Image (spheres, helix red, strand yellow):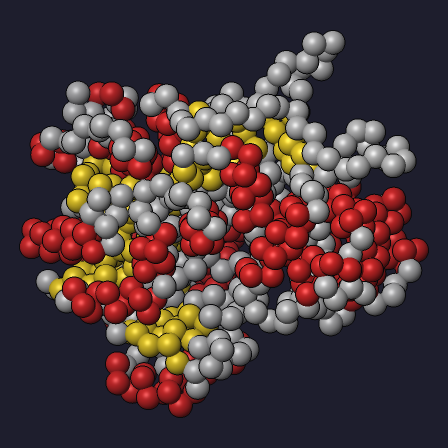
Amino acid sequence: MKSVGEIMSIGRSFEEMIQKGLRMIGQGMHGFVGNDHTRFEDLDNELANPTDLRIFAIAQALEDGYSIERIEELTKIDVWFLERLKHIVDLKHKLQTYNTLEEIPDEFLLEVKRCGFSDFQIARFVLKPGNVNMEKENLEVRRYRKQRGILPSVKRIPTVASEHPELTNYLYFTYTHTPAFGNPEGEQYKTMHDINYYNNEKSVIVLGSGAYRIGSSVEFDWCSVNAINTARKLGYKSIMINYNPETVSTDYDMCDRLYFDELSLERVLDVIDLESPRGVIVSVGGQIPNNLAMKLHRQGVPVLGTSPVDIDRAENRDKFSAMLDKLGIDQPAWRALSSFDDVKQFVDEVGYPVLVRPSYVLSGAAMNVCYDDEELHRFLNMATEVSKEFPVVISKFMTETKEIEFDAVADKGEVVEYAISEHVEYAGVHSGDATMVFPAQHIYFSTIRQIKKISRKIAKELNISGPFNIQFLAKNREVKVIECNLRASRSFPFVSKILKRNFIETATKIMLDAPYSKPDKSEFDIDRIGVKASQFSFARLQNADPVLGVDMSSTGEVGCLGDDLNEALLNALIATGYRLPKENSSILISSGGAKGKVSLLEPAKQLVKKGYKVYATGGTAKFFNDNGVAATPVSWPDEEGENNVMDMIAQHQFGLIVNVPKNHTKRELTNGYRIRRGAIDHNIPLMTNVRLAKAFIEAFTAMKEEDIKIKSWQEYNA
C-alpha cells in the first residue's frame, strides 16, 4: 500500500460519483473530463500498467477513439464501468457543440448535472474561455442554472436499515430523484429535499480538511472537530462540509448537520443558499478552505475571523513582502524572475545556495535547494517553463539557521495566546518533517523577544482574529520571517496538548464574538518538554531516497513528553520506531561535509567513551582518528576491500547508521544512496541529518532506555 489518504463520494449514478470523487482527491482535477493539463505520450503502457493517473489515461483513450474492448483488454476493467465512463465523454462532446448557455436544452443541462459535471466543466466546454482563471464563467453557469430552476436536492442517508430508519443529519447533494431512472413523462424537474430548511440565525458552517495527503492530515481534523464542539457549546447549530470517511468530523453525530460532499466553491455556495448561516469558518481545515476564502468573500459570504482581504495579503508573496518592508521586518532576499539571465544575476548578488520554486511544475519537483550553477541549470530545465506567465521564485537559502515556529491566536489584531517552538534540524527541512521541540530550548532570550515583537506587529497590521502561524529564521541574533499563514497550522494540536490550553477553542470563541479566558502569564512557564517527531514510510516506497529536503515526505507524527529534552526526544524517536543501539554495538558514521564532521566529533567521543564501536567512511574515519576518536574505516559500496559497508549492513552489524549527504556529485549520491537505502531495507535505524543525529546520540549516551520514566499526561506539572 502506498496511499496516505482517501475520499468518499456519494451520489445516485456511477457517473456522478466518479466525477465528484476525482475532484475531491484534490490533485487539481476537474472530474473525469476537462483536465487539459494531463496528456500521456505512451497510452497503451499507461493503460496496461496502473498508476494513480490511469483513470485519466482512460479518458484520453476514449477521446482518441479507442474501442471499449481495446481498453478492457489493456486495463482488465469491467466493461460496465468503461461504458459509464464513455457516457461521460459522449456528454462532453455533445456539450462542446453548444457555444452559449442559452442554447442548451434544460433536460440536457439536467442530464449532465446528473452525471456529475461541475459548473466549471460546463463553463469550460460551452463557453470555451481559454486559459483564464475561470471564476467569472463558473458563476455565470451557476446563475443561468438557478434561473432555469436546475438545483441540486439534499438527500439523507438513513443509518439504521429497518422499517423506521433513524433520521440522522448525514446529507449529500444530487440531481437524481427516485425513481432513480426514467422520469415519468411531462413532470417538471424540481428539487426535493429530505430535510426542512428554516432560517436560523445561530448556525455556523465549518469547512473541513478534505482528503489526507502528505502535508495536510489529521491535525486539521482535530482543529475542525474542536471548532464544531466549541460552536455547539456556545449554542450554535454546527454544519460541517467534508468528504473524508476516516475523520472524526465526518461522524454524523459530531455536528448538527453533516454535508458529505465536495469542498468546491459551487458546493459550498449550495449549502450557504440553503442554510443562510451566520458565517463560514475557513481557518481550521488547512489549505483547501483557506483557498476558498477570497472567492466566498467576492460572493458576499460572511467569512468569520480574519477578513479574506487580509488572508490574501498574507498568501500573496508580493503583497506580504511589501507589508514586511513597510513594517521594517527582515525577510530572506527573494525575487520572482522570468529568464535565465535574471536568475544568474540574482544568484551573483546573493550567492549560493538558493531555494528555487517554479510556479508551474511538472513531475512534482516543487522546490529545490541548488548549491551551484550545474544544479541550478539542471533544476530549471526540469521545471519546464520559465516565462513571464510562470516566473520562478528564487530566494537566498540560509544555511546553519534555526527555524522557529510561532503558533498563536489573536483577537482583532491583539495576540491572546501563543507558543514558540523550535526545529532540531536547521532550516532546509520542511516544517512537517522536522523534529520540533516545545517550549523552545536553545534560543537566545533576545531572539524570543524579537519574535514576540514581530508577531505582534504582523497580527496588528493584518488585524488577525483567529488562529495563525508564522515561521521565522534565526541566526546569530538576526530574525527573519519566512511566511505567515492565517489559519491553524500543523503544530496547533501539539502545542495545545503540551500547554494544556486548547488554542482552537479560544480561536472559535473569538470568531463567534463569545467571551473567552485569557491565559495567565505563568501558564507559558512550564517545566515539561514536548518533542514532535515525524513518521516516515520510506520502507513502503521501493527505491525512494530517505533524505529530507524542502518538500514534505512524512506520513504521520508522534508527540511525546519528558522532564528534560533527552527524555522527551528519546520517547518521541522510540515512538516512531527507532531502536536505541545496544551497549557495545557498532555505529556507522558518514558525516558529509567538513562542518558535519566537526559537529559529530563530540558525539563520536561520547560513543567511544560509553563503549560503542565507531565505524566510519574514509574521510570521516581519518578526521575522527586525527582528532583522538578511534574509528574503523569501512569501504564504500563501489570499492573492493575489507569491511565493505553493504556486506556489513546485510549482516546487520550496525545498531545505528548516520549518513549525511555531502554534496551532489554522482558518486557521492549513488554511494550514499546505497547506504541509506540499505539501512531502510534492512530495518536499521538511520539518521540523515547532522543536528538530529547529534541530539539523538547525546540523548542515548546520557540516558539509558530503562531510565525513561513512564508518566501519564496528567502527572506532568500536576
Q: Is residue 420 above or below residue 73?
A: above
> How far across and down, in percent of the image, does residue 396 sit?
29, 74
Q: Residue at x 42, y 28 (%)?
A: 201
693 or 223, which is in the foreground?
A: 223
Q: Quadrant of the N terminus?
A: top right
Q: Is residue 417 above or below residue 674?
A: above
Q: Residue at x 81, y 62 (%)?
A: 93
Residue at the far left: name it.
446
Quarter-of-image position of residue 636: bottom left
> How far across and down, in percent of the image, does residue 256 sit?
49, 23
Q: Residue at x 16, y 31 (%)?
A: 518
Q: Is residue 462 left or right of residue 578?
A: left
> How far across and down, in percent of the image, does residue 281 sit?
40, 40
> How far across and down, in percent of the image, does residue 484 sit?
29, 56
214 or 541, which is in the foreground?
A: 214
Q: Is residue 302 left or right of residue 531?
A: right
Q: Is residue 620 left or right of residue 273?
A: left
Q: Residue at x 23, y 61 (%)?
A: 481
Q: Quadrant of the C terminus?
A: top left
Q: Is residue 29 above or below residue 269?
A: below
> Is residue 582 in view from this perspective?
no
Q: Is residue 554 above or below residue 355?
A: above
> Is residue 308 in view from this perspective?
yes
Could you tell me how many numbered marks the image carries? 0
Residue at the far top: name it.
163
69 or 15, which is in the foreground?
A: 15
